[in-house]
Amino acid sequence: MQTEQQVFRIMFVDNEKDILRVIKRGLESSESNDTTSKFKVDAYQELALQSFQNHPDNYYDLVLTDLKMPKINGFELYMRMKEKNPRMKFAFMTAYDNIDKEKFANYSSAIDPNSFISKPVTASKLKSKLMYIIYK
């Protein structure tokens, strides 16, 4: 008997097109031991905030964003999206081990330190981390 998979809709924001493609493919692939859930990923280089604001609050289960981007950084995106939907869950990807402590301190009461993911990351570790954030 096959159980129905739960589908989680993720908004992924990164300024690098190759990263968007690789992460989207990795999250949407079924190469995982978890047969009860899968991800549907909307990947954005630009216009993420506009798209987020045009969808109902319950459209996305989680926003996964890069921290360092040229037009709007991940923290700024977080604050703007939280204005529309305070309950939205977030995960932050960074290639830097040393996250900007000063910027993080401004948001530390609102952002869980466990929501940071270091690049590079395998698809299976990323899926596990996102599931943890979604369910906590």
Image: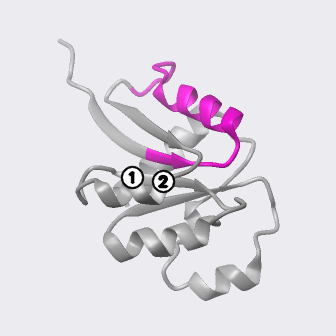
> Is-magenta flag for residue 29?
yes
| Residue 51, numbered circle | 1
Where residue 72 appears, as percent x and y from the top left, is 63, 66
Q: Residue furthest left?
A: 1
Where residue 36 appears, as percent x and y from the top left, is 31, 29
| Residue 104, numbered circle | none
Instruction: Name the side, left or right, on which 116 lies relative to 88.
Output: right
Q: Residue furthest top?
A: 1
| Amino acid bearing label 2 | Ala
Where residue 57 appears, as percent x and y from the top left, is 25, 60
Q: Picture quarter containing residue 26?
A: top right
Read off the magenta span. Answer: 11-34
> Is-magenta flag for residue 27?
yes
Residue visible at 44% across and 39% down in the picture? 42
Where residue 120 appears, as percent x and y from the top left, is 75, 42
The 10 Å Cα crowd at callout 1, few under 14, some 14 to 19, many 20 or more, is few
Instruction: Name the side, left or right, on which 54 lies relative to 3.
Output: right
Is the C-beta separation of discs 2 and 1 under 8 Å? yes
Find the distance from the CA under tag 2 to the CA under tag 1: 5 Å
| Amino acid bearing label 1 | Ser
Residue 86 shows in the view? no
Residue visible at 33% across and 50% down in the picture? 60
Residue visible at 48% across and 80% down in the picture? 110
Q: In the rendered image, which quarter contains the N terminus?
A: top left
**Label 1's element?**
helix
Instruction: Establish if 75 lies above or below 4.
Output: below
**Label 2's element?**
helix
Q: In the rendered image, which quarter contains the C terminus?
A: bottom left
Instruction: Find disc 2 in the rendering and name its residue.
Output: 48
Instruction: Establish if 3 lies above or below 39.
Output: above
Instruction: Name the side, left or right, on which 84 lies relative to 78.
Output: left
Q: In this view of the protein, which residue sits in the foreground, 31 or 19?
A: 19
